[in-house]
Amino acid sequence: MSVPTPEFAVLFRDFMVERIRDEHGSTGNVLKALHDGDWRPDPKSRTARELAWHLAHSERWFLDSTAKLDYAGGEDGPVPATVQEIVEYYNAGFEDALAKISALSGEQLLGVADFFGMKMPVYTLLNFAHIHTIHHRAQLATYIRPLGGKVPDIYGGSADTPFGQ
């Protein structure tokens, strides 16, 4: 296996920034479709607002932490009172964080980050963040109908939002 170069790290970063940007709208639509409520499918599960907050806060934390090259902290903090507040938080600062990440050098991206005791190159954490968002968005999408909402399209139509609408 070859050792990644700074050029590879930059190409990977640019690819991931575009993937994250592409998914942002779909995730925002899932958040917006969620009705306020504290329903949970199981006592071990988060409530709808807790899961929405974890999703929104985690993505922002991942992006801001990567932009600063510092992964300390990460706790979700208090859950906002409404889904609207969560949506507003999710959208605030998004493009700014992506611009800061896009300004990181290949050498910075190859630097090893301490991510909760796991040591890995910074550029790989962009993929981790991306997968984390998609995972929790899928969980959250299953909460929408039980709370009386309509599931938006994510990768094409849904039973509530036919393809192309």
Image (spheres, rainbow, N blue to C red):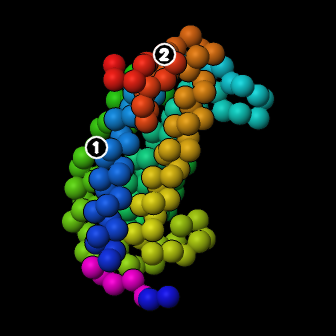
Q: Which mark is residue 160?
A: 2
Q: Residue at x 38, y 42 (%)?
A: 23
The answer for how far apart the CA atoms under marks 1 and 2 are is: 30 Å
Can residue 64 be spotted in the picture? Answer: no
The residue type indicated by label 2 comes to Asp
Q: Which residue, given by chain and number where applicable, does mark 1 sit on? A: 93
Q: Residue at x 34, y 23 (%)?
A: 164
Coordinates of residue 13 in the picture (x, y in percent)? 32, 65
Does 85 appear above or below 110? above
Does 90 appear above or below 157? below
Q: Main secondary structure of the magenta part?
A: loop
Does 48 appear above or below 96? above
Ranked by sequence position, the earlier of labels 1 and 2 is 1
Left or right, 139 with respect to 165, comes to right
Instruction: Characterize the local packing of mark 1: few (<14), some (14-19) or many (20 or more) Cα atoms within 10 angstroms.
Output: some
For mark 1, give the secondary structure. loop
1 vs 2, front mark: 2
The residue type indicated by label 1 comes to Gly
Q: Residue at x 34, y 68 (%)?
A: 12
Q: Residue at x 42, y 61 (%)?
A: 126
Coordinates of residue 28 in the picture (x, y in percent)? 39, 32
The segment highlighted magenta reads: 3-7
